[in-house]
Image (cartoon, grey):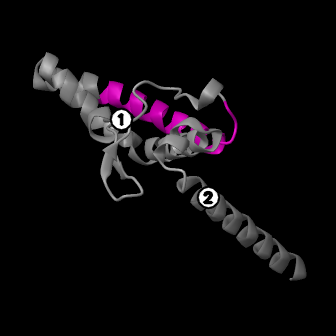
Amino acid sequence: MMIRRMSIAAAMAALLAFYCATAAAQRYGDEYRETSTFGRMQNKLGRGLANVITGAIEIPKNISNEWRKSDPVTGVIVGGVKGIGWAATRVAVGAFETVTFPVPVPPNYEPLMQPALPLPGVWGEQLPYFDRGGDPKLTL
């Protein structure tokens, strides 16, 4: 019972330290997050979680792409098979990136898969951030 309480306390202390480190990194702005090792680690973790959660989007995406190239029946069959393969790959890559986010593999925390997210036109765009004066700016 005592060991269980100590492990819970240690886990809570580690979680608190992680949140404090995240808050400290955020005060430097988006430029710091994009260029720092900690920022690239966060990006890899987010990319991995997004791929695990949204990997199944590859199935309708590939069906749609194949449907446009051919007739509907062929599009559903070929696109469905391709989509299942891409979805399984994306979920596996996402799980790998989620587990290994603190390790710079591949070098510089680059994505293992291109595009890095299933719908890059929707989720891959840069979001504005606000500088200290409250003015919106785009990160490029």
Q: Is residue 93 magenta?
A: yes
Q: Which residue is mark 2?
A: 24
The boundaries of the magenta stretch are 80-104
Main secondary structure along the magenta-highlighted residues: helix
**Does residue 53 sit above or below 114 in this rendering?**
below
Q: Which residue is mark 1?
A: 118
State the separation of the CA atoms marked 1 and 2: 31 Å
- Quadrant housing the N terminus: bottom right
Give the structural element (helix, strand or loop) at label 2.
Answer: helix
Which amino acid lies under the numbered mark 1 shown in the image of this protein? Pro
Which amino acid lies under the numbered mark 2 shown in the image of this protein? Ala
Q: Position of residue 70 (x, y in %)?
A: 13, 17
Q: Residue furthest front?
A: 133
Q: Residues within 10 Å of mark 1 (few under 14, many from 20)?
A: many
Q: Looking at the image, which residue is at 65% across and 64% down?
A: 20
Most foreground residue, 135 or 80 = 135
Residue 68 seen in this snapshot? yes
Report if the CB atoms under discs 1 and 2 are less than 8 Å apart.
no
Q: Position of residue 46 (x, y in %)?
A: 50, 46
Q: Residues within 10 Å of mark 2 (few under 14, many from 20)?
A: few
Q: Is residue 19 magenta?
A: no
